[in-house]
Image (tube, coloured by chain):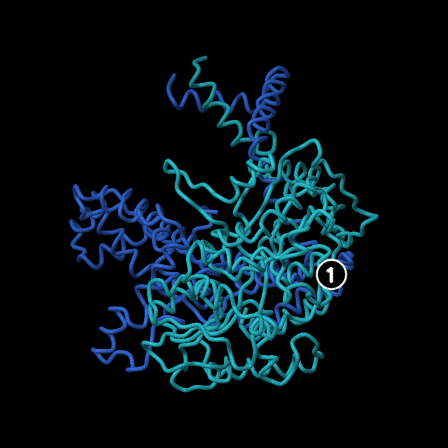
Chain colours: A blue, B cyan
Amino acid sequence: MSVAQFGGQVAAEAGGPGAGEVEQERRRGRVGYLLLLPGLLWLVIFFLVPTVQLVATGLYDPNGSLDTGYAMTWSFSNYWDVLVQYQEQFLRSFGYALIATIACIFLGYPLSYAIAFKAGRWKNLMLVLVIAPFFTSFLVRTLAWKSILSDNGLIVETLKTLQLIPEDGRLLATPVAVVTGLTYNFLPFMVLPLYASLEKIDPRLIEASKDLYASGVTSFRKVTLPLSAPGLVAGTLLTFIPAAGDYINSELLGTPQQRMIGNVIDNLFLVQLDYPAAAASSVLLMVAIVCLVVFYVRRAGTEDLL
Amino acid sequence: MSHDRLALEALVRAQLRSGRGLSRRGFLRGASLAGLAVGAPSLLSACGTPAAQQTEASCQTEDKSATEKTLAISNWPLYIDEAKKNGQTVYPTLQKFEKESGIKVDYTTDYNDNNEFFGIVRNQLADCQPTGRDIIVPTDWMAARMIDLGWIQELDKSKLPNVQANLAESLRSPSWDPERKHSVPWQSGLTGIAYNADLVDEVGSFEDLLTRSDLKGKVTLLSEMHDTMVFLLLMTGADPEDFTEDEFGTAIDRLGEAVDAGQIRAFTGNDYAQDLVKGNVVACEAWSGDVIQLQFDNPNIKFVAPEEGLSLWSDNMMVPNQGFHKANAEAWMDFYYQPEVAAELAAWVNYICPVQGAQDAMTKIDPDLAENQLIFPTSETLANGYDFMALDTKTEQKYQQMFADVIGA
């Protein structure tokens, strides 16, 4: 049967299906839901319930305490209070995450490009090298940066000799160290999706643009870049979102002046035992990130990614 | 009809009549309904949490020690003597205890951090549920909080003759457990100042730490509020064992000045040790046991008791509610209060040994360590140690918040 014939027949059937077929279709729908059940259950138990719990905890009486318990008083003011009190840390988190993401793009794009188009037989090796840091823990990698950037370390000494930082200057315990740590830790999340989308580009498209007398720059701008946009958007999200919520880099590489919102939530929850404020801050962080992401994806014109 | 066609047909149909097949919209609707159905009960339970306070009446624990010869202990890492045997780590004193008492010990080192551990057991203890542990080892202020919440069982002193006889005088009546009814110190330590003598002149006081210009940006303090504030309170003329909210506020302001001036580089946990060795930090607030370890590699790292005063702390063995083997736990506590056992432990752990008589026993194991002031301080030194005023949870929370605002967390 040819495709045209088939299409015609389907259209005809769609016009008036028999009773038996409706039944058959229902069953098929049910099978679909059944197949989704494990995933749905997982989502409900590990995402929906905790989220509801978190939002609710954010509404508890801020005057409660552990020994007296917390009553549900629908204190929406909790959310406003933490926003006002910790606006500095909120803004700093998004600022650092933004800078780190941009740095990741500038480091990650050429790297992915090289792996996808220029690496030849080294391709697999380079990919392994990108992923290799994941074999050690996040914490250990961040601690390693403490050694790399230490005051008497090679990098700081070199920069001092080059007069790029003052004689009593330092890198560790500055915003530079925190952003460097974030950039390093999340770079693979930028490289991998970018590589995936660059690698998929049909080289004949680039050849075609050359045939049409596009210069190297033009064909990159008009062909390669737009085709790799989905990878770029995915990479940005995968870098920005965890970076904004990170607290390890600030904790280990920063000082009190570089605290991010993740540190605040950690401290509120574990040390101060102020559960309503901790929950409210977490919810606000999530909401802020979702809003930023939706805005960004709309602007980037890649809604179909979501 | 061929098989492929069936599949294709289904797909096309789903496209044609969205809503009846498994369209995205239908899926989302179904998913949210299912979510609500499962989520609703938890929605109800999300309405507030009950009080965590327990009393002896509200939470009674049966002692199964007579029939079950087991004991589950959660302790800090690297806090018991270790040896290698056939490539496996064993604990010699623990094995001796098992042999003598016939009690099987399940020893885990999952107590990494007071606040983190509190987070782990909080829900069970607040609800009078078993935590699966018979002994936990919180630091003074956390021990105080747990006793205050009624989460700890009272010990039977008649089963602790060695503890009664050998517990160091200065540790017998902390403000939060004046008669040691609920707690027995495992190890103690001093909080003081460590500095690198290669890089900097002697740093003798907190005043020095917070003001000397040659230390600027090269000083760390501990992120633990109680540890650090003892010294700030002393600096501003208050008594850490009995102070008012105003006095605490003054001490916090003093700390804030030092932070704003850039004098203090960071507030840390144990990780100050790495910075001190690497020279990123030249002087810091430190725990005595860590410094002994560092001195093995670099004798120029010095520990001083600050001029403002000494802070002596302990990690305390306690039996939480619904720890079903209290008598076994008491046997363990008493075992470690024999001077010979205590000395064997102290020789490996290097913290302050809370057991009188252990110093004599130590001379047989390692005479050098027996002379070490950081393991066996003189009783005068210990008598001058301050501990932190016992606080109720609400005040504690307030002070923690004030401290957190200054240290930027």
Residue B16 versus residue B196: which sits nearer the camera? Answer: B196
Q: Quadrant of residue B27?
A: top right
Query: Is residue A78 shown left or right of residue A12?
Result: right
Most distant residue in the right direction: B57
Question: Disc 1 sits on a residue from what chain?
Answer: B
Dot 1 alpha-carbon crowd within 10 angstroms: few under 14, some 14 to 19, many 20 or more? few
- Residue A171 versus residue B75 in the image, above or below: below
Residue with the mark numbered 1? B179
Q: Quadrant of residue A274?
A: bottom right
Query: Is residue B292 shown left or right of residue B333?
Result: left
Query: Is residue B317 shown left or right of residue B192?
Result: right
**Which quadrant would the C terminus of chain B be assigned to in this image?**
bottom right
For mark 1, give the secondary structure.
loop
**Which quadrant would the N terminus of chain B be assigned to in this image?**
top left
**Percent coordinates x, y for residue B218 in the rendering:** 40, 77
- The amino acid sitting under disc 1 is Glu
Can residue A53 be seen at all in this image of the molecule?
no
- Residue A249 versus residue A17 in the image, above or below: below
**Percent coordinates x, y for residue A239 in the rendering:** 41, 56
Which residue sits at x=61%, y=59%? A269
Q: How many marks?
A: 1
**Percent coordinates x, y for residue B350 in the rendering:** 46, 59
Most distant residue in the top direction: B1
Residue A285 versus residue B204: which sits nearer the camera? Answer: B204
**Percent coordinates x, y for residue B216 in the rendering:** 41, 82
Can residue B59 be seen at all in this image of the molecule?
yes
Query: Is residue B42 shown left or right of residue B366?
Result: right
